[in-house]
């Protein structure tokens, strides 16, 4: 079952894609991250394709968040490359990585609670040129009309779902080419998760490559084209999300479909979550 991460496009395919002017794939190659003297991410390679959602699943402690933080320049990378076209973004500073077109939404929300929604968005555009900040802000508010109505409210007054929308909007104001979202649904009610799902679809449809880390496999696999399963710091499965939807036994780490708190997300048939395919 465990196709290797090299179901990534081969180098000929990448050369052809470059020649045809197709947008670049973001390629993570051989990433190693150590924390507390222990390697918690070990030789991880994966691809994030523009215009698609790629799911990264895995149990608690698998190393998903450590991977995200290292790709975003927040934790040191012990080895590996983060390839965007010709450029290797590995070990660059977070601002530089974001400027290159890769935005990170880390696990847990980080808003400035005393500032308004509008001010939180402005904080996220401070390094952009005025024109770009204006366009990015308009685009983010188009995706989250709920926020437009709350611009003058303090962030602390938002509901959990609205706060998550603001966190996503902050990542999108810089109009990134790729966004990595760590735990979209953390602590959110099912009805709120339902609202976020079409938004993630729209983000991908706009051409952005999305890497979605998500505790609810049904949500992630409903959105994703490709999926990876990480356990013990390694990629244990790389393949099509559809395959995992159709053959859930492939998710041999049974937690993925089993370990959902009761009532958190109903089965796809009842919940109206995107159907397979
Ligand atoms: N600050 C830290 N110092 C030392 N070890 C850490 C630290 N944070 C996390 N770890 C360890 O790194 C490993 C990977 O943790 P990580 O948070 O990346 O996993 P995860 O896949 O994101 O899990 P979850 O699904 O619970 O968010 C775990 O064994 C964890 O105990
Ligand atoms: Mg995590």
Image: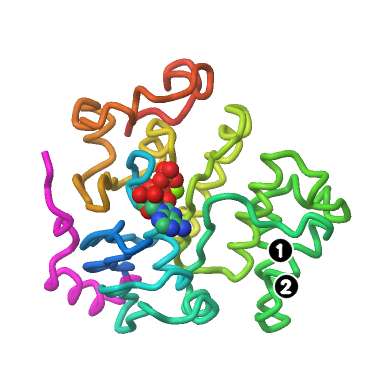
Q: Which mark is residue 154?
A: none
- Residue holding disc 2: 134
**Residue drawn at point x = 63 percent, y = 33 percent:** 192
The front one of 137 and 58 is 58
Assess whether residue 201 is covered by the magenta stretch: no
Q: Quadrant of residue 16?
A: bottom left
**Distance CA(mark 2)–CA(mark 1):** 6 Å
Q: Residue 264: image x %, image y %?
A: 53, 23
SS under mark 2: helix
- Tell me whether the residue at label 2 lies in contact with that at label 1, contact meaning CB atoms closer than 8 angstroms: yes
The answer to whether one can see residue 52 in this image is no
**Residue drawn at point x = 66 percent, y = 80 percent:** 128
Q: Which mark is residue 138?
A: 1
Q: Residues within 10 Å of mark 1 (few under 14, many from 20)?
A: some
Vertical relation: 180 (above or below) 24:
above
Horizontal side of residue 134 vs 22, given as left or right: right
Query: Which part of the image, by quadrant, shows the C terminus?
Result: top left
**Stretch of the chain drawn in magenta:** 1-24
Assess whether residue 16 is covered by the magenta stretch: yes
Q: Residue 49: image x %, image y %?
A: 33, 60
- List the single residue furthest toward the right: 152
Horizontal side of residue 159 vs 236, given as left or right: right
**Residue drawn at point x = 80 percent, y = 65 percent:** 119
The front one of 153 and 40 is 40
The front one of 275 and 86 is 86
Query: Which part of the image, by quadrant, shows the N terminus?
Result: top left
Q: Quadrant of residue 11?
A: bottom left
Q: Residue 110: image x %, image y %?
A: 65, 56
The front one of 58 and 242 is 58
């Amino acid at each position: 079952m465990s196709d290797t991460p090299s179901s990534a496009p081969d180098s000929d395919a990448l050369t052809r894609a470059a020649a045809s002017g197709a947008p670049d794939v973001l390629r993570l190659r051989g990433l190693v991250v150590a924390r507390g003297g222990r390697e918690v991410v070990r030789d991880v390679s994966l691809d994030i394709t523009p215009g698609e959602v790629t799911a990264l699943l895995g149990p608690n402690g698998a190393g998903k968040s450590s991977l995200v933080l290292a790709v975003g320049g927040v934790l040191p990378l012990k080895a590996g490359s983060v390839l965007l076209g010709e450029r290797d973004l590995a070990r660059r500073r977070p601002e530089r990585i974001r400027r290159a077109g890769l935005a990170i939404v880390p696990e847990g929300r980080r808003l400035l609670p005393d500032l308004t929604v509008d001010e939180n968005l402005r904080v996220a555009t401070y390094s952009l040129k005025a024109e770009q900040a204006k366009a990015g802000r308009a685009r983010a508010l188009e995706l989250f009309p709920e926020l437009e109505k709350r611009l003058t409210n303090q962030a602390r007054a938002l509901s959990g779902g609205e706060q998550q929308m603001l966190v996503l909007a902050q990542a999108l104001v810089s109009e990134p080419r790729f966004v990595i979202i760590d735990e979209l649904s953390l602590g959110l009610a099912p009805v709120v998760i339902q609202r976020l799902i079409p938004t993630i679809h729209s983000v991908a449809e706009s051409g952005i490559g999305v890497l979605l880390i998500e505790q609810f496999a049904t949500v992630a696999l409903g959105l994703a084209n490709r999926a990876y399963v990480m356990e013990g710091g390694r990629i244990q499965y790389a393949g099509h999300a559809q395959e995992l939807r159709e053959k859930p036994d492939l998710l041999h780490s049974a937690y993925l479909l089993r370990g959902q708190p009761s009532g958190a997300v109903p089965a796809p048939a009842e919940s109206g979550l995107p159907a397979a395919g």
